Amino acid sequence: MRLHRQQNKMKDKKLEEWDLKTIQKIKEQVKKGNNTLYTVLRSVSRSGMQRKIDVYMIVDNEPLYLTPLIAAVCGYSREKQGYALKVNGCGMDMGFHVVNSLSVSIGTELNHRWL
């Protein structure tokens, strides 16, 4: 049920042209065998219930910053400075959760690694 809701979120949202081009670029990279997204943990709240995470993909030996795309597609909020994703929860690998949410939303299998 939850996965179905996440897929419908993307259909309901109007994504910007940059977002659509980036999604297409991700899908092209996956076809080439590059399906790994890299997450960077920026901070953890004192309570441990919120993390700030950035997400990248390496394309042609250059990092591609995916955090704004993931915020738009998956509905995550971003910190006040506008950089990292705010991810709430604990007890699981939240970087994996972010990458898996994007994977389900765009319909492409993605892997995850921490930097």
Image (spheres, rainbow, N blue to C red):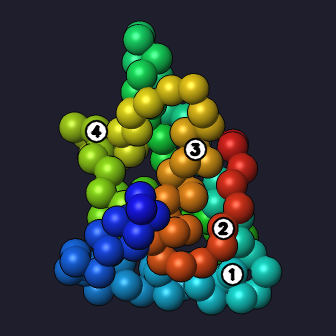
The kind of residue tagged 1 is Val
Marks 2/1 in contact by CB < 8 Å: the verdict is yes
Left or right, 39 with reference to 87:
right
Determine the image quadrant of residue 36.
bottom right
**Residue marked by disc 3:** 95
**Residue marked by disc 1:** 30
Q: Quick one: label 3, few (<14), some, or many (20+) residues within 10 Å?
A: many
Q: Earlier in the sequence, mark 2 or mark 1?
A: 1
Q: Secondary structure at mark 4?
A: loop
Residue 112, given in percent of the width and then of the height, sits at 69, 55
Q: Secondary structure at mark 2?
A: loop
Real-space Cα separation, disc 3 to disc 2, in angstroms: 12 Å
Q: Nearer the viewer, mark 1 or mark 4?
A: 1
Q: Earlier in the sequence, mark 1 or mark 4?
A: 1
Real-space Cα separation, disc 3 to disc 4, in angstroms: 16 Å
The residue under the point 59% across, 84% down is 27
Determine the image quadrant of residue 87.
top left
**Residue marked by disc 2:** 110
The kind of residue tagged 2 is Leu
Observer able to see residue 86: yes
